[in-house]
Image: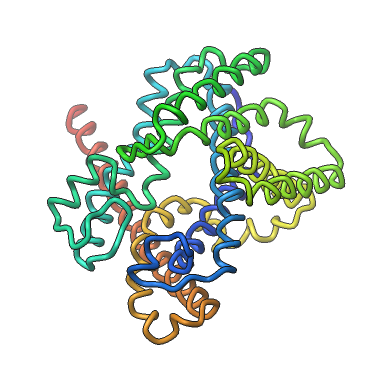
Amino acid sequence: MAEKKYYNYISDMKIVCLMFVIFGHCAIYYISTSPYISHLGVSSPFVDKMFDVFDMTLMPAFVIGSGFLYANSITRNKNATILSELTRRSKRILLPFLLWGVFWVVPMYTTFNVFGYGRPENAGYLEGYKYLFLGCFAEHLWLLLMLFWVTLVFILLKPLISKKLLPLTAVIAVGLAMASQYLLDGIEYYKLGQIAPFIPIYFIGIAIYYYSEQLEKLPVAVLLLSSAVMLAISIFMIPYKNQHFLFHWIGRITGGISLLLLFLVIDRMGFNDKLHKTRFWKFTSRNSMIIYLYNCPIMQIYYKLLSKKIGDNVALCVSVLFVMSMITLYIITFVHERISKMLRERFKNAGLGKKEKKKA
Protein backbone atom coordinates (compact mmCIF):
# COMPACT_ATOMS: atom_id res chain seq x y z
CA MET A 1 0.00 0.00 0.00
CA ALA A 2 1.35 3.40 -1.00
CA GLU A 3 1.88 6.12 1.58
CA LYS A 4 -1.29 8.08 2.29
CA LYS A 5 -1.33 11.73 1.30
CA TYR A 6 -3.85 14.11 2.83
CA TYR A 7 -5.64 16.57 0.58
CA ASN A 8 -6.88 19.24 2.97
CA TYR A 9 -8.59 21.26 0.26
CA ILE A 10 -10.69 18.23 -0.74
CA SER A 11 -11.73 17.30 2.79
CA ASP A 12 -12.40 20.96 3.69
CA MET A 13 -14.52 21.37 0.58
CA LYS A 14 -16.63 18.30 1.33
CA ILE A 15 -17.17 19.37 4.94
CA VAL A 16 -18.19 22.93 4.05
CA CYS A 17 -20.50 21.67 1.29
CA LEU A 18 -22.32 19.41 3.77
CA MET A 19 -22.72 22.28 6.23
CA PHE A 20 -24.16 24.53 3.52
CA VAL A 21 -26.50 21.73 2.46
CA ILE A 22 -27.79 21.65 6.04
CA PHE A 23 -28.25 25.42 5.83
CA GLY A 24 -30.19 24.85 2.63
CA HIS A 25 -32.44 22.40 4.43
CA CYS A 26 -33.27 25.20 6.87
CA ALA A 27 -34.40 27.41 3.98
CA ILE A 28 -36.21 24.77 1.93
CA TYR A 29 -39.61 25.94 3.20
CA TYR A 30 -39.26 29.11 1.16
CA ILE A 31 -38.53 27.60 -2.27
CA SER A 32 -41.44 28.27 -4.64
CA THR A 33 -41.17 24.82 -6.24
CA SER A 34 -40.85 22.93 -2.95
CA PRO A 35 -43.70 20.65 -1.81
CA TYR A 36 -43.05 22.04 1.68
CA ILE A 37 -44.74 25.27 0.56
CA SER A 38 -48.19 23.71 0.60
CA HIS A 39 -47.49 22.18 4.01
CA LEU A 40 -45.57 24.80 5.94
CA GLY A 41 -43.85 27.70 4.27
CA VAL A 42 -44.15 30.72 2.03
CA SER A 43 -42.06 31.32 -1.09
CA SER A 44 -39.13 33.72 -1.36
CA PRO A 45 -37.55 34.79 -4.70
CA PHE A 46 -34.18 35.28 -2.98
CA VAL A 47 -34.21 31.73 -1.60
CA ASP A 48 -35.12 30.43 -5.07
CA LYS A 49 -32.02 32.10 -6.52
CA MET A 50 -29.85 30.93 -3.63
CA PHE A 51 -30.97 27.33 -4.17
CA ASP A 52 -30.20 27.58 -7.88
CA VAL A 53 -26.59 28.44 -6.98
CA PHE A 54 -26.48 25.75 -4.28
CA ASP A 55 -27.80 23.18 -6.77
CA MET A 56 -25.04 24.05 -9.23
CA THR A 57 -22.19 24.03 -6.72
CA LEU A 58 -22.56 22.21 -3.38
CA MET A 59 -23.48 18.63 -4.21
CA PRO A 60 -21.43 18.62 -7.45
CA ALA A 61 -18.35 19.75 -5.48
CA PHE A 62 -19.02 17.07 -2.84
CA VAL A 63 -19.28 14.36 -5.54
CA ILE A 64 -16.15 15.64 -7.31
CA GLY A 65 -14.36 15.34 -3.97
CA SER A 66 -15.69 11.79 -3.57
CA GLY A 67 -14.42 10.83 -7.03
CA PHE A 68 -11.06 12.43 -6.26
CA LEU A 69 -10.66 10.45 -3.03
CA TYR A 70 -11.86 7.23 -4.70
CA ALA A 71 -9.11 7.56 -7.31
CA ASN A 72 -6.59 8.20 -4.53
CA SER A 73 -7.83 5.11 -2.68
CA ILE A 74 -7.55 2.70 -5.61
CA THR A 75 -4.14 4.13 -6.49
CA ARG A 76 -2.86 3.38 -2.98
CA ASN A 77 -4.60 -0.03 -2.88
CA LYS A 78 -3.79 -1.34 -6.34
CA ASN A 79 -4.24 -4.97 -5.34
CA ALA A 80 -7.77 -4.49 -4.01
CA THR A 81 -10.29 -6.59 -5.92
CA ILE A 82 -13.62 -5.36 -7.24
CA LEU A 83 -15.37 -7.54 -4.64
CA SER A 84 -13.33 -6.12 -1.76
CA GLU A 85 -13.99 -2.56 -2.98
CA LEU A 86 -17.70 -3.29 -3.27
CA THR A 87 -17.79 -4.76 0.25
CA ARG A 88 -15.89 -1.82 1.73
CA ARG A 89 -18.01 0.82 0.01
CA SER A 90 -21.22 -0.98 0.98
CA LYS A 91 -20.19 -0.83 4.63
CA ARG A 92 -19.36 2.86 4.36
CA ILE A 93 -22.39 3.93 2.33
CA LEU A 94 -25.26 1.41 2.43
CA LEU A 95 -24.89 0.41 6.07
CA PRO A 96 -25.32 4.03 7.33
CA PHE A 97 -28.37 4.37 5.07
CA LEU A 98 -29.98 1.36 6.74
CA LEU A 99 -28.94 2.29 10.28
CA TRP A 100 -30.04 5.92 10.13
CA GLY A 101 -33.10 5.07 8.07
CA VAL A 102 -34.33 2.40 10.48
CA PHE A 103 -33.36 3.98 13.79
CA TRP A 104 -33.60 7.71 13.05
CA VAL A 105 -35.45 8.84 9.93
CA VAL A 106 -38.56 6.65 10.07
CA PRO A 107 -39.05 6.92 13.89
CA MET A 108 -38.50 10.70 13.93
CA TYR A 109 -40.68 11.48 10.92
CA THR A 110 -43.43 9.20 12.19
CA THR A 111 -43.36 10.36 15.81
CA PHE A 112 -43.50 14.04 14.87
CA ASN A 113 -45.57 13.42 11.71
CA VAL A 114 -43.17 15.46 9.58
CA PHE A 115 -43.72 15.84 5.84
CA GLY A 116 -41.02 14.13 3.78
CA TYR A 117 -40.35 13.30 0.12
CA GLY A 118 -41.69 9.84 -0.69
CA ARG A 119 -43.43 9.47 2.66
CA PRO A 120 -47.23 9.32 2.43
CA GLU A 121 -48.90 11.94 4.59
CA ASN A 122 -49.71 10.71 8.11
CA ALA A 123 -47.93 7.42 7.37
CA GLY A 124 -47.41 5.04 10.28
CA TYR A 125 -44.27 3.13 11.17
CA LEU A 126 -44.93 0.12 8.93
CA GLU A 127 -45.73 2.29 5.93
CA GLY A 128 -42.68 4.43 6.64
CA TYR A 129 -40.39 1.39 6.73
CA LYS A 130 -42.02 0.05 3.57
CA TYR A 131 -41.15 3.17 1.59
CA LEU A 132 -37.71 3.36 3.20
CA PHE A 133 -36.81 -0.15 2.05
CA LEU A 134 -38.18 0.64 -1.41
CA GLY A 135 -35.79 3.58 -1.48
CA CYS A 136 -38.63 6.06 -2.09
CA PHE A 137 -38.60 7.67 1.35
CA ALA A 138 -35.01 8.60 2.04
CA GLU A 139 -35.03 12.37 2.57
CA HIS A 140 -31.41 13.55 3.05
CA LEU A 141 -30.23 9.92 2.94
CA TRP A 142 -30.78 10.04 -0.84
CA LEU A 143 -27.15 11.21 -0.94
CA LEU A 144 -25.99 7.79 0.28
CA LEU A 145 -28.07 5.90 -2.28
CA MET A 146 -26.93 8.13 -5.14
CA LEU A 147 -23.30 7.93 -4.01
CA PHE A 148 -23.48 4.14 -3.79
CA TRP A 149 -24.80 3.70 -7.35
CA VAL A 150 -22.31 6.15 -8.81
CA THR A 151 -19.41 4.60 -6.90
CA LEU A 152 -20.58 1.15 -8.04
CA VAL A 153 -20.23 2.29 -11.67
CA PHE A 154 -16.59 3.19 -11.11
CA ILE A 155 -15.87 0.11 -9.00
CA LEU A 156 -16.91 -1.96 -12.03
CA LEU A 157 -14.76 0.28 -14.22
CA LYS A 158 -11.79 -0.04 -11.83
CA PRO A 159 -9.59 -2.00 -14.31
CA LEU A 160 -9.87 0.96 -16.71
CA ILE A 161 -9.21 3.72 -14.22
CA SER A 162 -5.70 5.07 -14.75
CA LYS A 163 -4.14 8.21 -16.11
CA LYS A 164 -3.39 6.60 -19.47
CA LEU A 165 -6.92 5.27 -19.93
CA LEU A 166 -8.77 8.40 -18.78
CA PRO A 167 -10.11 9.22 -22.30
CA LEU A 168 -11.61 5.72 -22.62
CA THR A 169 -13.06 5.89 -19.10
CA ALA A 170 -14.53 9.30 -19.92
CA VAL A 171 -16.31 7.97 -23.02
CA ILE A 172 -17.74 5.02 -21.09
CA ALA A 173 -18.78 7.22 -18.14
CA VAL A 174 -20.57 9.70 -20.40
CA GLY A 175 -22.24 6.83 -22.27
CA LEU A 176 -23.49 5.29 -19.03
CA ALA A 177 -24.67 8.68 -17.81
CA MET A 178 -26.65 9.25 -21.01
CA ALA A 179 -28.16 5.77 -20.79
CA SER A 180 -29.11 6.41 -17.16
CA GLN A 181 -30.68 9.73 -18.09
CA TYR A 182 -32.95 8.19 -20.71
CA LEU A 183 -33.65 4.83 -19.06
CA LEU A 184 -33.83 5.67 -15.36
CA ASP A 185 -35.15 9.24 -15.33
CA GLY A 186 -38.19 9.54 -13.08
CA ILE A 187 -37.59 6.28 -11.21
CA GLU A 188 -37.90 7.03 -7.49
CA TYR A 189 -37.00 3.55 -6.27
CA TYR A 190 -33.58 3.65 -4.59
CA LYS A 191 -33.06 7.08 -6.20
CA LEU A 192 -32.00 5.46 -9.48
CA GLY A 193 -33.53 8.36 -11.37
CA GLN A 194 -31.08 10.82 -9.78
CA ILE A 195 -27.73 9.21 -10.54
CA ALA A 196 -27.23 10.22 -14.21
CA PRO A 197 -25.73 13.73 -13.77
CA PHE A 198 -23.43 12.60 -10.98
CA ILE A 199 -21.65 9.92 -13.04
CA PRO A 200 -19.70 12.45 -15.17
CA ILE A 201 -19.28 14.69 -12.11
CA TYR A 202 -17.69 11.80 -10.17
CA PHE A 203 -15.45 11.09 -13.16
CA ILE A 204 -14.29 14.73 -13.16
CA GLY A 205 -13.08 14.16 -9.58
CA ILE A 206 -11.15 11.08 -10.71
CA ALA A 207 -9.57 12.98 -13.61
CA ILE A 208 -8.61 15.91 -11.39
CA TYR A 209 -6.88 13.50 -9.00
CA TYR A 210 -4.57 12.22 -11.74
CA TYR A 211 -3.59 15.78 -12.63
CA SER A 212 -3.62 17.10 -9.07
CA GLU A 213 0.18 17.55 -8.90
CA GLN A 214 0.13 19.85 -11.92
CA LEU A 215 -2.99 21.61 -10.64
CA GLU A 216 -1.46 22.28 -7.22
CA LYS A 217 1.56 23.94 -8.86
CA LEU A 218 -0.47 26.51 -10.80
CA PRO A 219 -0.16 30.15 -9.66
CA VAL A 220 -2.84 31.32 -7.25
CA ALA A 221 -3.94 34.01 -9.69
CA VAL A 222 -4.57 31.40 -12.40
CA LEU A 223 -6.55 29.23 -9.98
CA LEU A 224 -8.67 32.17 -8.83
CA LEU A 225 -9.37 33.31 -12.37
CA SER A 226 -10.26 29.76 -13.42
CA SER A 227 -12.56 29.41 -10.43
CA ALA A 228 -14.32 32.67 -11.29
CA VAL A 229 -14.74 31.66 -14.94
CA MET A 230 -16.14 28.26 -13.98
CA LEU A 231 -18.58 29.86 -11.53
CA ALA A 232 -19.68 32.37 -14.17
CA ILE A 233 -20.40 29.55 -16.63
CA SER A 234 -22.32 27.67 -13.94
CA ILE A 235 -24.48 30.68 -13.05
CA PHE A 236 -25.01 31.44 -16.75
CA MET A 237 -26.50 27.95 -17.16
CA ILE A 238 -29.10 28.41 -14.40
CA PRO A 239 -31.87 29.92 -16.60
CA TYR A 240 -31.40 27.09 -19.13
CA LYS A 241 -31.12 24.11 -16.76
CA ASN A 242 -34.73 23.07 -17.25
CA GLN A 243 -34.61 23.41 -21.04
CA HIS A 244 -32.19 20.50 -21.54
CA PHE A 245 -30.43 18.28 -19.05
CA LEU A 246 -27.04 18.94 -20.67
CA PHE A 247 -27.21 22.60 -19.63
CA HIS A 248 -27.83 21.42 -16.07
CA TRP A 249 -24.93 18.97 -16.26
CA ILE A 250 -22.54 21.61 -17.59
CA GLY A 251 -23.61 24.05 -14.89
CA ARG A 252 -23.07 21.48 -12.16
CA ILE A 253 -19.70 20.32 -13.46
CA THR A 254 -18.34 23.86 -13.79
CA GLY A 255 -19.87 24.87 -10.45
CA GLY A 256 -18.25 21.91 -8.69
CA ILE A 257 -14.86 22.58 -10.28
CA SER A 258 -15.15 26.25 -9.28
CA LEU A 259 -15.46 25.34 -5.59
CA LEU A 260 -12.59 22.84 -5.78
CA LEU A 261 -10.28 25.49 -7.25
CA LEU A 262 -11.42 28.00 -4.62
CA PHE A 263 -10.64 25.62 -1.77
CA LEU A 264 -7.27 24.83 -3.32
CA VAL A 265 -6.50 28.57 -3.27
CA ILE A 266 -7.61 28.82 0.37
CA ASP A 267 -5.33 25.90 1.24
CA ARG A 268 -2.40 27.30 -0.74
CA MET A 269 -2.73 30.69 0.95
CA GLY A 270 -2.86 29.08 4.38
CA PHE A 271 -6.14 30.77 5.32
CA ASN A 272 -7.37 27.57 6.95
CA ASP A 273 -4.24 26.73 8.97
CA LYS A 274 -5.47 28.23 12.25
CA LEU A 275 -8.94 26.75 11.74
CA HIS A 276 -7.49 23.24 11.37
CA LYS A 277 -5.89 23.52 14.81
CA THR A 278 -9.14 24.33 16.63
CA ARG A 279 -11.04 21.69 18.56
CA PHE A 280 -14.23 22.77 16.82
CA TRP A 281 -12.83 22.02 13.35
CA LYS A 282 -11.20 18.75 14.41
CA PHE A 283 -14.54 17.59 15.82
CA THR A 284 -16.41 18.75 12.70
CA SER A 285 -13.85 17.19 10.39
CA ARG A 286 -14.13 13.70 11.88
CA ASN A 287 -17.92 13.90 12.31
CA SER A 288 -19.17 15.91 9.32
CA MET A 289 -21.06 13.00 7.78
CA ILE A 290 -22.56 12.05 11.16
CA ILE A 291 -23.79 15.63 11.57
CA TYR A 292 -25.33 15.43 8.11
CA LEU A 293 -26.99 12.07 8.76
CA TYR A 294 -28.79 13.43 11.81
CA ASN A 295 -29.80 16.77 10.26
CA CYS A 296 -33.32 15.83 9.10
CA PRO A 297 -35.93 16.20 10.51
CA ILE A 298 -34.40 18.43 13.23
CA MET A 299 -35.04 21.65 11.29
CA GLN A 300 -38.52 20.53 10.21
CA ILE A 301 -39.50 20.08 13.84
CA TYR A 302 -38.04 23.46 14.83
CA TYR A 303 -39.68 25.16 11.85
CA LYS A 304 -43.10 24.02 13.04
CA LEU A 305 -42.41 25.82 16.31
CA LEU A 306 -40.87 28.96 14.78
CA SER A 307 -43.05 29.47 11.71
CA LYS A 308 -46.06 30.81 13.63
CA LYS A 309 -43.99 33.52 15.30
CA ILE A 310 -41.27 34.53 12.83
CA GLY A 311 -42.07 32.48 9.71
CA ASP A 312 -42.90 35.58 7.65
CA ASN A 313 -39.42 37.03 8.23
CA VAL A 314 -37.38 34.79 5.93
CA ALA A 315 -33.88 35.94 6.94
CA LEU A 316 -34.60 35.84 10.67
CA CYS A 317 -36.41 32.51 10.58
CA VAL A 318 -33.76 30.75 8.48
CA SER A 319 -30.93 32.17 10.62
CA VAL A 320 -32.52 31.19 13.93
CA LEU A 321 -33.49 27.81 12.52
CA PHE A 322 -29.94 27.14 11.34
CA VAL A 323 -28.37 28.13 14.67
CA MET A 324 -30.84 26.04 16.68
CA SER A 325 -30.43 23.06 14.34
CA MET A 326 -26.62 23.19 14.38
CA ILE A 327 -26.46 23.43 18.18
CA THR A 328 -28.77 20.42 18.43
CA LEU A 329 -26.83 18.48 15.80
CA TYR A 330 -23.49 19.10 17.51
CA ILE A 331 -24.92 17.94 20.85
CA ILE A 332 -26.38 14.78 19.27
CA THR A 333 -23.12 14.11 17.42
CA PHE A 334 -21.05 14.65 20.58
CA VAL A 335 -23.18 12.07 22.41
CA HIS A 336 -22.98 9.75 19.40
CA GLU A 337 -19.19 9.98 19.35
CA ARG A 338 -18.89 9.30 23.07
CA ILE A 339 -21.19 6.28 22.93
CA SER A 340 -19.41 4.93 19.84
CA LYS A 341 -16.02 5.29 21.53
CA MET A 342 -17.29 3.55 24.67
CA LEU A 343 -18.73 0.65 22.68
CA ARG A 344 -15.54 0.23 20.64
CA GLU A 345 -13.46 0.08 23.82
CA ARG A 346 -15.79 -2.49 25.35
CA PHE A 347 -15.71 -4.70 22.24
CA LYS A 348 -11.93 -4.33 22.09
CA ASN A 349 -11.53 -5.29 25.75
CA ALA A 350 -13.92 -8.21 25.30
CA GLY A 351 -11.84 -9.43 22.35
CA LEU A 352 -8.59 -9.14 24.32
CA GLY A 353 -10.18 -11.03 27.19
CA LYS A 354 -11.12 -13.93 24.97
CA LYS A 355 -7.58 -14.09 23.53
CA GLU A 356 -6.06 -14.19 27.03
CA LYS A 357 -8.40 -17.02 28.08
CA LYS A 358 -7.37 -19.04 25.00
CA LYS A 359 -3.68 -18.52 25.81
CA ALA A 360 -4.27 -19.62 29.39
> Which quarter of the rendering shows the N terminus?
top right
Q: Quadrant of residue 51?
A: bottom right
Question: Measured from the top left, where is residue 250 in percent x and y?
Answer: 64, 38
Using residue 113 as the reference point, say whether residue 207 is left or right of it: right
User: Could you tell me which residue is drawn at 39 percent across and 52 percent down?
Assistant: 140
Question: Measured from the top left, where is residue 317 in percent x and y?
Answer: 48, 78
User: Could you tell me which residue is drawn at 35 percent across and 26 percent down?
Assistant: 87
Asked if 113 appears above or below 262 in the picture, the reply is below
Using residue 346 as the reference point, say whether residue 223 is left or right of it: right
Asked if 155 appears above or below 198 in the picture, the reply is above
Question: Measured from the top left, where is residue 262 in percent x and y?
Answer: 72, 49
Using residue 59 as the reference point, say whether residue 290 is left or right of it: left
Q: Nearer the viewer, residue 244 or 275?
A: 244
User: Could you tell me which residue is drawn at 32 percent across and 71 percent down?
Assistant: 301
> Which quarter of the rendering shows the C terminus?
top left
The residue most toward the bottom is 309
Q: Quadrant of residue 165?
A: top right
Q: Nearer the viewer, residue 41 or 167?
A: 41
Asked if 194 appears above or below 295 in the picture, the reply is above
The colour scheme is rainbow
Question: Measured from the top left, where is residue 188 in percent x and y?
Answer: 33, 40
Query: How many numbered marks, from 0 up?
Result: 0
User: Could you tell me which residue is drawn at 59 percent across and 45 percent down?
Assistant: 241
